Image (spheres, rainbow, N blue to C red):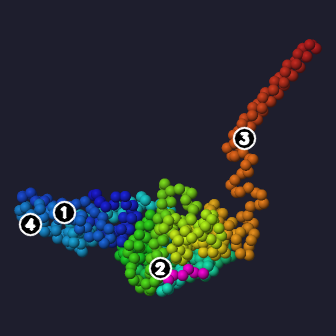
């Protein structure tokens, strides 16, 4: 059976539409040939969440009204029947296969429903790859900038750094035999995870507890388990933005960027006007953060595409581009410590620092995002915070070594208050060549290879002729010795 409305749609997007309230529908119509009555069904259509299918069903309604009445006696029975089926089950024009009340077709409907499920499951398996969204847990304190009626204020760098270190430590499992024990926060998360898993096993877990359990699992880096906790209730909780945000996070960390984009788009489309336990200001702030996170995942998804360039993955994310791409340069046009050109600053939203803080706390292992935060601190004149972040990005744990990051780190290290000397590990020796550049008097690598190859050939030939000459002389010596013996005899 053909399915209309899914052209160029991936399985992840199709599944997300169905889970969020989309429907796959068919329309019945009938044709009367006086003594013969034909009752037929249309192709299946995908209706997006909130759509009623009026336009898709209108041609079949008109067709039945014009050609359905003339059969005796079934035309007078089937024409109003198919019209009733289209008006049944909460839709003015169509009956949805996802709702068993929408049709009275028995086994045929079950077969159609199974067929749709097979489409979703089969294509999902075909496109699944081995490759984060907001992370919500109502049982733990809200992680992120300070939200108040007057606006959202970024955390002080010291407090932000402590929070980030704590979140990273939750996901670090100490190896067997290690003298170090798990962090107190990790022990707390493990205990809460076990409590909620027990509730899930006994069937006494609520939807909100499932959401919280998924957040504990994600922080503990158990992403597959988080998906398994949320997926069974996703179809019944279509308005729960926290559930879909956590589900998107888990899929992204599993490498499913396409699914993460689809679920985050659902979060955006279904964003509530009010939510229990959240003030209007908090809800507005989270919506802003989710907006930029969706943009971030879209950028990463395009990079991961086959046509994406690997070099782009060592550049800053172009996250704030509503007014054009931001270049972190001073009025001079060059990168400078603690400065940003006025034209570039005008492209940044007023809450840019708070937005990236929020995203980093949701994705504490994302080094490129952390680098962007360092650039924002430098643009705001906080050279010490910027230098600390750049050091962390290049250090032994993250080991991110983009050329722009290394260059910017040297600039802020030189200007860092109280530390005029460069880091020994990164400072070039006096009169040393720039990394990656050879002195002009040295040949380039191509010339070295060519000259080396020619030299090798010459050495082999000289060796061959030398051995040949030695063998000839030895042979001549033997001949001379034999002649001398003959003369003596």
Q: Which residue is mark 1?
A: 60
Helix, strand or loop at label 3? It is helix
Q: Is residue 158 left or right of residue 477?
A: left
Contact (Cβ within 8 Å) of mark 2 with mark 4: no
In the rendered image, which quarter contains the C terminus? top right
Identify the disc placed on residue 285.
Answer: 2
Q: Position of residue 471 (x, y in %)?
A: 81, 26
Res 243 → quadrant: bottom left
Residue located 54% across and 81% down the image: 153
Q: Which residue is mark 4?
A: 76
Q: Is residue 465 visible?
A: yes
Q: Position of residue 404 (x, y in %)?
A: 62, 62
Helix, strand or loop at label 4? It is helix
Sequence-wise, the earlier of marks 4 and 1 is 1
In space, the residues marked 3 and 2 are separated at their CA atoms by: 64 Å
Residue located 33% across and 60% down the image: 6
Sequence-wise, the earlier of marks 1 and 2 is 1
Sequence-wise, the earlier of marks 2 and 4 is 4
In space, the residues marked 1 and 2 are separated at their CA atoms by: 46 Å
Q: Is residue 14 left or right of residue 449?
A: left
As displayed, is residue 137 above or below residue 342?
A: below
Sequence-wise, the earlier of marks 3 and 2 is 2
Helix, strand or loop at label 2? It is helix
Sequence-wise, the earlier of marks 3 and 1 is 1
Identify the disc placed on residue 452.
Answer: 3
Q: Position of residue 442 (x, y in %)?
A: 74, 47
Res 361 → quadrant: bottom right
Q: Position of residue 354 (x, y in %)?
A: 54, 77
Q: Which is in the foreground here, disc 4 or disc 3?
A: 3
Magenta run includes residue 152: yes
Instruction: Provide the residue span drawn in magenta.
Output: 151-156
Most foreground residue, 392 or 139 = 392
């Amino acid at each position: 059976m053909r399915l209309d409305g899914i052209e160029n749609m991936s399985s992840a997007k199709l599944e997300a539409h169905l889970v969020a309230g989309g429907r796959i529908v068919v329309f019945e119509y009938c044709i009367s040939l006086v003594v013969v009555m034909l009752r037929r069904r249309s192709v299946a259509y995908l209706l997006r969440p909130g759509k009623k299918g009026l336009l898709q069903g209108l041609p079949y309604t008109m067709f039945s009204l014009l050609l359905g009445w003339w059969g005796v006696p079934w035309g007078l029975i089937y024409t109003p029947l198919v019209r009733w089926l289209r008006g049944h089950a909460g839709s003015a024009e169509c009956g949805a296969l996802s709702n068993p009340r929408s049709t009275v077709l028995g086994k045929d409907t079950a077969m159609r429903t199974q067929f749709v499920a097979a489409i979703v499951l089969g294509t999902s398996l075909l496109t699944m790859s081995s490759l984060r969204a907001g992370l919500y847990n109502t049982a733990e304190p809200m992680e992120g900038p300070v939200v108040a009626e007057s606006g959202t204020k970024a955390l002080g760098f010291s407090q932000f750094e402590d929070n980030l270190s704590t979140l990273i430590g939750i996901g670090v499992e100490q190896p067997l035999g290690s003298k170090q024990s798990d962090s107190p926060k990790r022990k707390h998360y493990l205990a809460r995870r076990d409590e909620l898993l027990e509730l899930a096993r006994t069937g006494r877990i609520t939807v909100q507890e499932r959401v919280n359990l998924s957040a504990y699992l994600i922080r503990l880096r158990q992403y597959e388990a988080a998906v398994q906790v949320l997926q069974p209730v996703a179809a019944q909780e279509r308005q729960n933005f926290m559930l879909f945000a956590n589900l998107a996070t888990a899929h992204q960390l599993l490498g499913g960027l396409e699914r993460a984009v689809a679920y985050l788009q659902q979060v955006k489309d279904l964003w509530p006007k009010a939510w229990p336990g959240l003030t209007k200001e908090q809800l507005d702030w989270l919506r802003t953060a989710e907006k930029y996170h969706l943009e971030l995942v879209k950028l990463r998804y395009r990079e991961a595409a086959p046509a994406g360039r690997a070099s782009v993955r060592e550049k800053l994310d172009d996250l704030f581009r509503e007014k054009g791409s931001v270049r972190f340069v001073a009025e001079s046009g060059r990168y400078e410590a603690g400065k940003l050109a006025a034209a570039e600053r005008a492209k940044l939203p007023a809450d840019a620092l708070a937005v990236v803080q929020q995203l980093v706390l949701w994705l504490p292992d994302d080094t490129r995002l952390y680098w962007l935060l360092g650039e924002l601190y430098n643009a705001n004149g906080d050279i010490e915070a910027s230098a600390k972040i750049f050091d962390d990005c290049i250090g032994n744990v993250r080991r991110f070594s983009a050329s722009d990051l290394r260059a910017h780190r040297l600039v802020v290290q030189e200007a860092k208050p109280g530390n005029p000397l460069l880091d020994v590990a990164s400072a070039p020796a006096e009169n040393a060549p720039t990394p990656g550049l050879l002195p002009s008097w040295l040949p380039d690598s191509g010339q070295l290879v060519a000259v080396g190859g020619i030299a090798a050939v010459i050495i082999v030939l000289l060796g061959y002729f030398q051995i040949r000459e030695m063998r000839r002389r030895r042979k001549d010596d033997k001949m001379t010795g034999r002649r001398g013996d003959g003369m003596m005899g």
